[in-house]
Image: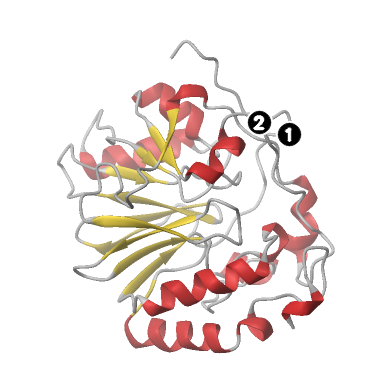
Amino acid sequence: MDHEMNYGSDYKFIPATSIGSGVGMEVLPDVFCHTVQIVNICLVGIPKTGDFVLVDAGMPGSADEIISVTEERFGANSRPKAIILTHGHFDHVGAVIELVKHWDVPVYAHQMEMPFLTGQKSYPEPDPTVEGGLVAKMSPMFPNEPIDLGNNVQPLPSDGTVPYMQEFKWIHTPGHSPGHVSLFREKDRALIVGDAFVTVKQEYLYKVLTQEQEISGPPRYLTTDWEAAKESVMKLEALKPSVAITGHGLPMSGELLESSLGKLVNEFDQIAVPDYGKYVNKNTH
């Protein structure tokens, strides 16, 4: 812990919210989803045990909220075994440094996300010109510089296992970011998606505010590789998940999830890929 961790110089609180903000939901007996402003974190493990992990780390400035939600579910002074990151965008690592300092736990992410988490490389700039609404227009204010977790972050094991999440496997689902992963448990087909697809049109402020449920591709203003994004959605749909907890929007399950994911795969270019924007390759249409 001798390495001084830091956020990028553009790190700041982002004034965005939704009606879901502050609301938690037990999706499965050992999977709890909580919304921090506009993004979801997951606590995976049986309540009141010390055996659990945190998936993703919320918005900038949300550490106190995440700690309090964790203690409410797992008991006072409880701490996860680890923090697993689906990817390193600002709204998924917003409180990670404070949480690592408070809990003294390791962080795991895909090898290809490591440059963005060890201070080496910025993400591409968000694209405010992309087809979409106000959230897309706000995106230039979103932090995209790398954070530096130093030796507190380690690559996920290359064999697909997830530390401290015995029954889950990580699946590489790039497109939204190079090292994006989703987490899947075969026995009940539970899927923690990250942002490979979401259940709210994340570009539109009205839909984000109201959390109107509608399956969509990854948030457009930060997605840079649409061909990879499409392949990732196809890979996840082939798993036939029974329930999906996405990075944005409400969890989706059962027939609605099955039909929505099928439609997203079949109509990906129409539903997910924006008609214009600087990361849109016209060849994908």
**Res. 113 image quadrant:** top right
* Image point (33%, 75%), residue name: 241
Residue 13 in picture, x, y percent from top left = 65, 38
What residue type is disc 2 on? Gln
Residue 71's mark?
none
Q: Nearer the viewer, mark 2 or mark 1?
A: 2
Q: Which corner quadrant holds the N terminus?
A: top left
User: Is 63 displayed left or right of 178 in the figure?
Assistant: left
Q: How many marks?
A: 2
Distance from the alpha carbon under mark 2 to that under mark 1: 15 Å
* Image point (29%, 50%), residue name: 161
Label 2 neighbour load within 10 Å: few <14, some 14-19, many 20+: few
Residue 94 in picture, x, y percent from top left = 55, 39
* Image point (51%, 35%), residue name: 95
The residue positioned farthest toward the front in the image shown:
159
* Image point (30%, 43%), residue name: 53
The residue positioned farthest toward the left in the image shown:
49
Q: What element carries label 2?
A: loop
Residue in the foreground of this view, choosing between 285 and 6: 285
Q: Which corner quadrant holds the C terminus?
A: bottom right
What residue type is disc 1 on? Asp
User: Is 103 displayed left or right of 206 in the figure?
Assistant: left
Say if 215 sits above or below 118 in the image.
below
Label 1 neighbour load within 10 Å: few <14, some 14-19, many 20+: few
Q: Is mark 1 on a helix, strand or loop?
A: loop
For disc 2, the marked residue is 120
For disc 1, the marked residue is 10
Residue 148 in picture, x, y percent from top left = 58, 27
Residue in the foreground of this view, choosing between 209 and 275: 275
Residue 188 in picture, x, y percent from top left = 21, 70
**Res. 171 image quadrant:** bottom left
Is residue 53 visible in the rendered image? The answer is yes
